[in-house]
Image (cartoon, rainbow, N blue to C red):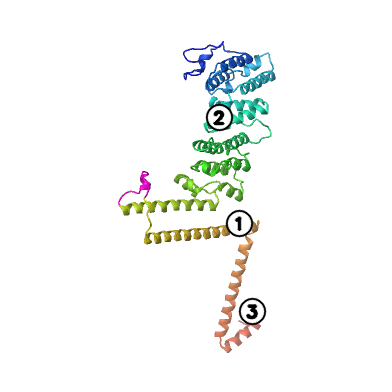
Amino acid sequence: MMKLSPESVNLTGKSTHFSAECWFDDTCILDMDYFVKTLSGIKAKGVRPELIGSIITHYASKWLPDLSNDEGSEVFMGPKDFEDSPESVTAIWMKKRFFVETLVGILPPEKDSIPCNFLLRLLRVANMVRVEPSYRVDLEKRISWQLDQASLKELLIPSFVHTCGTLLDVELVLRLVKRFMNLDESVRSGSALIKVAKLVDNYLAEAAVDANLTLTEFFGLADALPAHARYTDDGLYRAIDTYLKTHPGVSKQERKTLCRLIDSRKLSPEASLHAAQNERLPVRAVIQVLLSEQTKVNKHQIDWSGSFISGTRSPNQLGLIEPPARCMSKREMNVQQMEIKRLKEDVLRLQSQCMTMQSQIEKLLEKKRGSGLFGWKKIIVPSLVNKVDKIGEIDRETDVGYVARQTPGDMKTRLVRGRTPNKWRKSLS
């Protein structure tokens, strides 16, 4: 039976100390209907929603280990119990479904009354036992309210739909993120949005390992958040690199589409160094990373040069005071304009080099496609013909030069010898 502790709980809801285990012992309520009636009586006494949520999570985790976060908890119904139980597996499955639907129906409507990770575990079991769509939608709404409190472990919900080709339920996470983005600005702004963006990037890195994950699903989830949600794009770059590594058949245009999601200015020096040497990225994406790093280096050089001229460290580097507003001198303006001009020239030069490299690569690919199994003949045979022609020209030039150096008497002798057969000359000798 339920046990109340006056020292720990005040029915008026004014006490802050509470432990859910003090409400139950090992012989807790087995009848779900009786538990609902008892919980309704507790609510009528004015107990706060946080305490009601703690009672529900403790009760559900005790009698349904799928909802417990403790890996070493006792099993509610294992394979041996299925064999020894007089009830069929279908009857036990229906009881579990009724248990989950009842829990969803008695959840407090307040936002933080139930932990987000418990709601995610409850949603996983609800999808597994195929609860009614209304209960599933209600759970998704509750989770989206506090999605910034979710952990990656609980968000990795498998897909229980046979028509889905992926191991993880990516469409479910996409629905949660879209519901979160449709909330009020006060709820989804600030640190909450940054936490959700980091959570989504980590989820994409895990889901990208699945070879059945399509580009549309990956791009849709990565693009569901605005650009300002990520203060750094290292996590997104890691997810895209993992996807390209797992899916080597992605076309060149699709690679460009994925790399447009990355803001090279938000990459750390380590990620920029890896991206500059990454052969899986398009050439244009690599050039953008190099240009961003060059801009950062030039900016640091300007800051350090200003600090050396003044004899002290730059206020921007100290981070304590803002630089005083003053007009730049003519010399400084000229230097800045020359620097901007030089950077523009470097960008144009890199773009021309990139276009040249792409044209050369396309020519090489066309040559490789044009040469078939006996394509070596096109290279070797013309060279041999040219060599034979050159040898023939050299022989003709030699003969002409030899004839030109001979005297008329020698030419006559040669003609006579040419008319005389060899065997007659040998017989006369």
* Disc nearer the start of the sequence (1/3): 1
Image x and y of residue 11, in percent: 52, 15
Is 312 on the left-hand or right-hand side of 153? left
Residue 18's disc is none
User: Which residues, given as a range, are shown in magenta?
Assistant: 311-323
Residue under label 3, please give it. Answer: 422
Mark 1 crowd level (few <14, some 14–19, many ≥20, 10 Å Cα): few
Query: Is there any visible trace of residue 227 in the rendered image?
Result: yes
* Disc nearer the start of the sequence (3/2): 2
Mark 3 crowd level (few <14, some 14–19, many ≥20, 10 Å Cα): few
In whole angstroms, how far apart are the C-alphas of marks 1 and 3? Answer: 60 Å
Which dot, 2 or 1, sits closer to the camera? Answer: 2
Residue 365's disc is 1
Q: Nearer the viewer, residue 100 or 362?
A: 100
* Disc nearer the start of the sequence (2/1): 2
Residue at x 60%, y 41% (from the top left corner): 218
Label total for image:
3
Under mark 2, the amino acid is Glu
Image x and y of residue 61, in percent: 56, 20
**Furthest residue to the left?**
311
Which dot, 1 or 3, sits closer to the camera? Answer: 1
Which dot, 3 or 2, sits closer to the camera? Answer: 2
Under mark 3, the amino acid is Asn
Residue under label 2, please give it. Answer: 154
Q: 117 above or below 411?
A: above
Q: 74 above or below 360?
A: above
